[in-house]
Amino acid sequence: MNSSITLTHLYLRHYCELRNFLLRRVGCREIATELTQETFIRVMVYPGESILNARAMLYRIASNLVIDYHRAHVKHPEYVCIDELPIHDSPVCNLTDPARVIYARQLLEKLCRAIEGLPPQCHRAFILHKFDGYTHVEIAEKLGVSRNAVEKLLIRALVQLRQVFT
């Protein structure tokens, strides 16, 4: 599978079919698309000199990726698929729909006002953690408080923000 022409041909010939196969297995088009891409990446770096049945290999790799996905995400989900969100929680996809654009802007403004309305220490800890990516220990050093105090500040911030959106 060293030839880029062969890989391109394989991709063009089997991409949609493989993505549809994965979509039926995982039930989310974004995850199916990611797994399809991962399948072709793994074929691309396959160490074997010759592949007797490339289509069978694609499906074997894809099936293994589905198993890995279910082990990692279905038992302990970290993310929710866009398809599973209620309509009012879905991201704005169609920029031509003025109602969705206005709703998204209002939601963003409401969130910004809620964050700005947090008490100063909560606000600073929240910004450092959520937007700047600092750990609790790093925030504690920056604010001159204990790690425990940082956790309490973040909990307090999240509780106040949740109250705004319920």
Image (tube, rainbow, N blue to C red):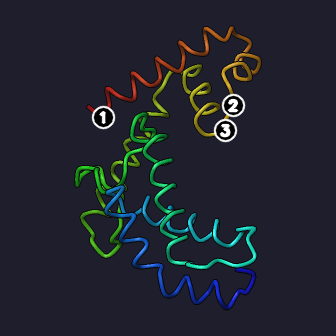
> Which residue type carries mark 1?
Phe
Residue 11: x and y, percent?
55, 82
Pick the front one: 39 or 82: 39
Front-most of residues 120 and 15: 15
**The C terminus lies in which quarter of the figure?**
top left
Q: CA distance from mark 1 to mark 3?
A: 23 Å
Q: Would residue 2 be found to the left or right of residue 113 on screen?
A: right
State left or right for residue 50 relative to residue 31.
right
Q: Quadrant of residue 94?
A: bottom left
State the residue in front, 85 or 45. Answer: 45
Residue 46: which disc? none
Give the left or right position of residue 48, taking residue 111 as reference: right
Q: Which mark is residue 165?
A: 1
Q: Is residue 126 above or below residue 19?
A: above
Q: Do labels 3 and 2 touch, CB within 8 Å?
A: yes
Q: Label 2 is placed on what type of residue?
A: Tyr
Who's the residue at 36% across and 55% down the image?
26
For the point 68% across and 73% down, the residue is 44
Residue farthest front in this picture: 52
Q: Secondary structure at mark 1?
A: loop
Q: Amino acid at mark 3?
A: Asp
Residue denoted by label 3: 132
- Nearer mark to the viewer, of 2 and 1: 2
Image quadrant where residue 121 sits: top right
Residue underneath mark 2? 134
Residue 72 position (above or below residue 15): above
Q: Is residue 149 above or below residue 124?
A: above
Pointer 1: residues within 10 angstroms few (<14), some, or many (20+)?
few
